Amino acid sequence: MNIQSFIDDAITEIRQQVKGRAIIGLSGGVDSSVCATLAYRALGERIVPVYVDSGLMRQFESDRIEMLFRDLGLVRFNAQDRFLEALKGVEDPEQKRKIIGETFIRIFEEEARKISADTLIQGTIYPDRIESEGGIKSHHNVGGLPSRMEFKHIVEPLHDLYKDEVREVARALGLPVEISERMPYPGPGLAVRIIGEVTKEKLEVVRIANAIVEEEISEYSPWQAFAAIIGKATGVKGDNRVYGWIVAIRSVSSRDAMTADVMELNWELLKRISSRITSEILSVARVVYDLTPKPPGTIEFE
Ligand code: XMP
């Protein structure tokens, strides 16, 4: 792919496809950031980037994104309680994705009404579509979209690109390294890193565990490295029996997320992560390392 001609064509196409004003869903990941930058170059102030703080994001992520995109006129929408309420009692992963996809869209619609926009621009990439259409997972921005929407048009300038191509475009657009090389993160966020119901308590635990894993593993350049809560188990802390969370660590290498290999991490590193998680999070009783490649496992647990 010739990157410069992709950029030129994408800008021309966005100008042709978007007539009035548009909302762009920005999560701060490489896909939506590239998309927002292309859209801004194509349409200038006719786009409004909206960042939804779903409460499912990683530690300190929301403030960081707000700072990074202030110049594009970013609107930050705080919706932590709304997502928690919508996810109450929901255990099924596909159901979670649908609820999250719908909640995102309803918020984008509310923002769109304020500026009379009828177009939503999204950073959907090729593998998102393939996995959703193949019935593997309803990615929240594809299969997780509600059937009825107020938007008249959905524009997806990156829909034929793989992640490594998006990164090349990000570099060519001059985006900061922390964005162009950013680890992929799923739209439904920590909700798919908690098996079973999403609660405030579990979110706090899994958020800290993810921060520890990223801090420890990032320098080994994983495709993705993260933590998930996969259940409860008995343990002993001090003189007391505890019935606490089981946190699973996953660290994989991959080219395009369609397949993935488990990283053979150094034993000392794994032991340090385990010990940090159990000592820094009181309610965690056990830490395990996932040894499953994709296939047969998927990258995320849900
Ligand atoms: P899986 O778990 O299917 O993930 O092997 C492949 C890649 O997609 C990410 N992922 C998602 N991204 N919405 C997204 O935007 C989703 O619903 C979703 N589910 C998984 C996952 O983190 C990995 O990079």
Image: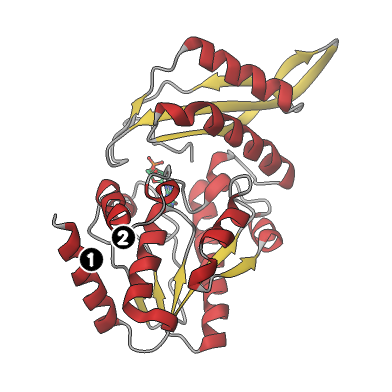
Q: Amino acid at mark 1?
A: Ile
291 is higher (above) or lower (below) than 120? above
Contact? badges 2 and 1 (CB < 8 Å): yes
Asked whether 69 or 289 is in front, the reply is 69
The quadrant holding residue 120 is: bottom left
Disc 1 target residue: 7
The quadrant holding residue 203 is: top right
203 is higher (above) or lower (below) than 126? above
Which of marks 1 and 2 precedes in the sequence? 1
- The N terminus is located in which quarter? bottom left
38 left or right of 71 in image: left
Q: Give SS at disc 1.
A: helix
Q: Residues within 10 Å of mark 1 (few under 14, many from 20)?
A: some
Which residue is at 28% across, 42% downward?
A: 256
Asked whether 296 or 291 is in front, the reply is 291
Disc 2 target residue: 173
Where in the figure is residue 21, as x and y percent of width and height? 42, 85
